[in-house]
Image (cartoon, helix red, strand yellow):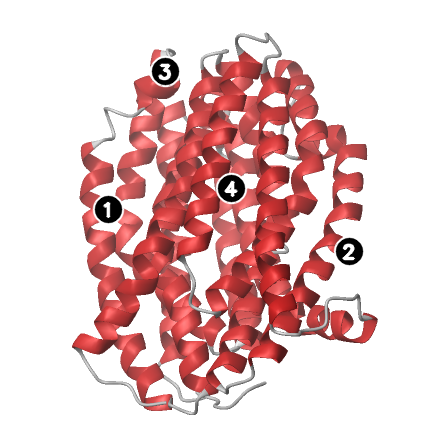
């Protein structure tokens, strides 16, 4: 496989990154819509959504390797000219999504109350948080099917189909949430049911796209225990990497809960903004996974190195743009989510600190995608564990002093600690990317 430098590289990246960008920002935009809908039920409901969402995103997010690992394997096999084997790997990913998603949904629904309590929900917040989580848990299998199917399509360098399905699904989610929360009068439970219905529809559509393509290519569709087990085994390092990252964000929410209801409510919205910005920057990471995987599968290590340098530069510049936008909107966004003046002012502080982190975040997400596309999963697991261990003492120190801090002081320090966490990730991933250990060519 031969690649032309500079302009050709840029065109390839943009061809994948532009639709991926729109797809990725669709989800957090509609999550922000959910927060706005629920937020006008009151501060308690917004705080409850924050706790329940943290648990739900963790339960589903730990299996995000279904997308990442599938993208890398499919892209490598496509680069090596093995289309049928690439689709069979995708079908294995769909089966694995169901095998992991169904028991996870059952466990989260059964233990919703203690899980919310562990995350710091108490008093008035605990009951609505439990209600939301018990219902929303039923969407977990669909979330995982969407992740696996999206990984297959990205491996084929198709980022347009996920865009169309995502926009349709999240639009339905926003509409259903509004109708069920307010006209139907179901409150926070309505928001959960609206999300589950939309997720189930999106999962079915994504699965049909992959299965139809696999059938046309003559790929195996039946459940094959050995291959599915192999797919699960290959995903273990990425699972460890994701668990470490999720643990960092869960600990952050745990500290926010100790700071009080107002900081917790503000933190919920700020985390949704963080997710929006992360998904926007992650468009380059999606392009990196597909292009690096395909390039290395075709034996072109020079292209992989060249594309990495270009996308990392773009990550920095994209982060600078988002930093300016976030800082400029720090006073404009809070009134959209709450009428509580204390929550508004606290949220403004969190957004200003968040803005500072964006250039580093841009580089971090690109390098993460590069190493995933290369299948350098063991290194990602170890580096994630190391950064979590370095970050945890900062959070423990902050929680120990939570009682002595005002809402704005606490949220400022909490998001400053999160900025340190992103800086640690940048150092670790940057070091790994400068080595040659991840430049392994050929189909896996």
Residue 400 seen in render: no
Alpha carbon separation for disc pair 2 and 4: 30 Å
Proximity of marks 1 and 2: CB atoms separated by less than 8 Å: no
Alpha carbon separation for disc pair 4 and 1: 22 Å
Residue 208, position as x, y percentages in the image? 62, 53
Q: Nearer the viewer, mark 1 or mark 2?
A: 2
Alpha carbon separation for disc pair 3 and 1: 25 Å
Q: Nearer the viewer, mark 4 or mark 1?
A: 1
Residue 173, position as x, y percentages in the image? 52, 30
- Which residue is denoted by mark 4 in the rendering? 252
Q: Nearer the viewer, mark 2 or mark 4?
A: 2
Alpha carbon separation for disc pair 3 and 2: 44 Å
Which residue is painted at 59% across and 85% down in the image?
444
- Residue 245 in which image quadrant: bottom right
Q: Earlier in the sequence, mark 1 or mark 2?
A: 2
Residue 73, position as x, y percentages in the image? 56, 75
Q: Which mark is residue 99?
A: 2
Give whichever of 392, 66 is nearer the camera: 66
- Which residue is denoted by mark 1 in the rendering? 322
* Circle 2 crowding by C-alpha within 10 Å: few under 14, some 14–19, many from 20: some
Number of callouts in the render? 4
Q: Which mark is residue 342?
A: 3
Proximity of marks 3 and 4: CB atoms separated by less than 8 Å: no
Along the horizontal axis of the image, is 106 left or right of 49?
Answer: right
Is 318 drawn above or below residue 108 in the view shown?
Answer: below
Q: Earlier in the sequence, mark 3 or mark 1?
A: 1
Alpha carbon separation for disc pair 3 and 4: 20 Å
């Amino acid at each position: 496989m031969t690649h032309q430098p500079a302009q050709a590289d840029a065109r390839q990246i943009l061809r994948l990154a532009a639709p991926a960008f729109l797809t990725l920002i669709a989800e957090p935009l509609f999550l922000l819509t959910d927060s706005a809908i629920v937020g006008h039920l009151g501060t308690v409901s917004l705080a409850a959504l924050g706790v329940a969402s943290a648990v739900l995103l963790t339960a589903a997010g730990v299996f995000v390797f279904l997308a990442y690992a599938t993208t890398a394997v499919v892209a490598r096999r496509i680069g090596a000219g093995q289309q049928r084997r690439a689709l069979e790997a995708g079908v294995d990913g769909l089966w694995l999504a169901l095998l992991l998603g169904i028991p996870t949904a059952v466990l989260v629904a059964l233990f919703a109350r203690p899980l919310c309590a562990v995350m710091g929900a108490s008093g008035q917040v605990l009951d609505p948080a439990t209600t939301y989580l018990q219902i929303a848990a039923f969407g977990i299998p669909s979330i995982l099917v969407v992740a696996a199917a999206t990984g297959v399509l990205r491996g084929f360098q198709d980022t347009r189909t996920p865009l169309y399905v995502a926009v349709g699904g999240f639009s339905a989610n926003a509409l259903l949430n509004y109708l069920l929360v307010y006209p139907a009068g179901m409150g926070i439970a309505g928001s959960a049911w609206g999300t589950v219905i939309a997720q189930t529809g999106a999962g079915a559509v994504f699965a049909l796209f992959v299965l139809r393509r696999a059938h046309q290519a003559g790929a195996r569709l039946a459940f094959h225990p050995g291959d599915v087990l192999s797919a699960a085994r290959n995903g273990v390092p990425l699972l460890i990497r994701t668990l470490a990252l999720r643990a960092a964000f869960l600990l952050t929410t745990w500290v926010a809960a100790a700071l009080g209801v107002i900081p917790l409510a503000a933190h919920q919205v700020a985390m949704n903004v963080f997710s929006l910005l992360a998904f926007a920057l992650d468009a380059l990471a999606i392009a990196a996974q597909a292009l690096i995987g395909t390039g290395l599968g075709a034996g072109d290590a020079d292209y992989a190195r060249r594309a990495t340098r270009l996308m990392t530069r773009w990550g920095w510049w994209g982060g600078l743009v988002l930093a300016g936008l976030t800082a400029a909107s720090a006073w404009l966004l809070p009134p959209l989510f709450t009428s509580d003046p204390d929550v508004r002012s606290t949220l403004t502080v969190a957004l200003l600190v968040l803005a500072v982190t964006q250039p580093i975040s841009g580089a971090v997400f690109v390098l993460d995608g590069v190493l995933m596309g290369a299948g350098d999963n063991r290194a990602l697991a170890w580096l994630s564990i190391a950064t979590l261990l370095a970050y945890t003492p900062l959070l423990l120190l902050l929680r120990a002093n939570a009682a002595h801090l005002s809402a704005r002081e606490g949220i400022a320090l909490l998001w400053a600690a999160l900025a340190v966490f992103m800086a640690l990730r940048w150092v670790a991933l940057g070091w790994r990317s400068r080595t040659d250990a991840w430049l392994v060519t050929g189909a896996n």
